[in-house]
Image (cartoon, rainbow, N blue to C red):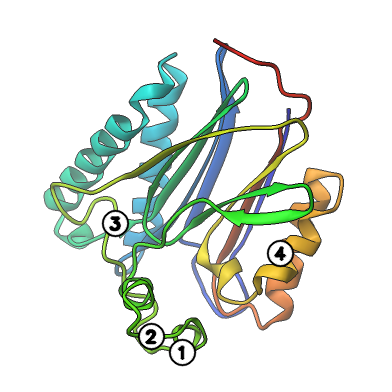
Amino acid sequence: MKIGGKTHCGYQREVNQDYFTYGENSNFSYMIVADGMGGHLAGEIASKKAVDFLKNKLDSTDDVVQLKTLIEQVNQDVYKISKENKDLNGMGTTLTVVIISGSYLNVGHVGDSRVYLFRDDKLSQLTTDHSLVADLVRHGQLSEKEAEKHPQRNILTQAVGTDRVVKVQSTSHRLKSYDKVLLCTDGLTKFLKHKEISDIMSQKEVNEICDRLIKAALKKGGADNVTVAVADVGEVKEVN
């Protein structure tokens, strides 16, 4: 297993509200990304708190099945902080995590950051964007091309920390040897097309992939924070 990650503030933002981490314990490896939102520093605090809370929970558990519950607990933790400090009221964040255990990939997701699986030179999106524009596309009220320029494309329908209850997307997938997994914030997907991401994912080294993805997004103007984390699962070992 090889994991790498990188983040960049972009060229037009003063604060990087993205945050990420990755790690492992005796039973699994994990990657987490978050993209905060809110007023002055609130988004930065929301994303860091959410990632740190979830990391602490993952570091102290061996149970990958409880991922949805762990994210719900993180939502309560961030929501509580936002209510205790008026300067942070209304803050929130996307939160997307993958757990890799043997031949299984478990995904927990809230917001419009994304998880992709790269297998046999094909890139597949594993998460659903929790956004107003994505809902319109799914219901046939908007084309994907129209969605790219829609003025409300940044409005989320689900975020961690904004409400007492959050709806978590939770899925499980079988892995094959030498699959690659990509987590990214929308600072990547707003500016790079599916094929552009796929072409870069074909590179061998995870750190090179991260560098090239960030550079490609910045080359489009760097209008947003951008964060990526990539895992090459290597040779998959079956687990019961």
Residue 142's mark? 2
Mark nearer the viewer, 1 or 4:
1
Q: Is 48 drawn above or below residue 173 in the view shown?
A: below
Q: Nearer the viewer, residue 185 or 135?
A: 135
Residue 222 x/y as whole percent? 63, 77
User: Residue furthest toward the right?
Assistant: 204
Q: Residues within 10 Å of mark 3 (few under 14, many from 20)?
A: many
**Left or right of 168 in this view: 16:** right
Q: Residue type at mark 4: give it.
A: Ile
Q: Residue type at mark 2: give it.
A: Leu
Residue 159's mark? 3
Mark nearer the viewer, 3 or 4:
4
Badges 2 and 1: C-beta atoms under 8 Å apart? yes
Q: Earlier in the sequence, mark 1 or mark 3?
A: 1
Mark nearer the viewer, 1 or 3:
1
Q: Secondary structure at mark 1?
A: helix
**Left or right of 81 in this view: 47:** right
| Residue plotted at (42% across, 58% down) | 128
Residue 155's mark? none
Q: Residue type at mark 3: give it.
A: Ala
Badges 3 and 4: C-beta atoms under 8 Å apart? no
* Measured Cα–Cα span from mark 3 to mark 4: 25 Å
Q: Residues within 10 Å of mark 1 (few under 14, many from 20)?
A: few
Residue 239 x/y as whole percent? 59, 13
Residue that carries the numbered disc 4 in the rendered image: 197
Q: Residues within 10 Å of mark 2 (few under 14, many from 20)?
A: some
* Measured Cα–Cα span from mark 1 to mark 3: 23 Å
Q: Secondary structure at mark 3?
A: loop
For the N terminus, the image quarter is top right
* Measured Cα–Cα span from mark 2 to mark 4: 23 Å
Q: Residue type at mark 1: give it.
A: Glu
Q: Secondary structure at mark 2?
A: loop
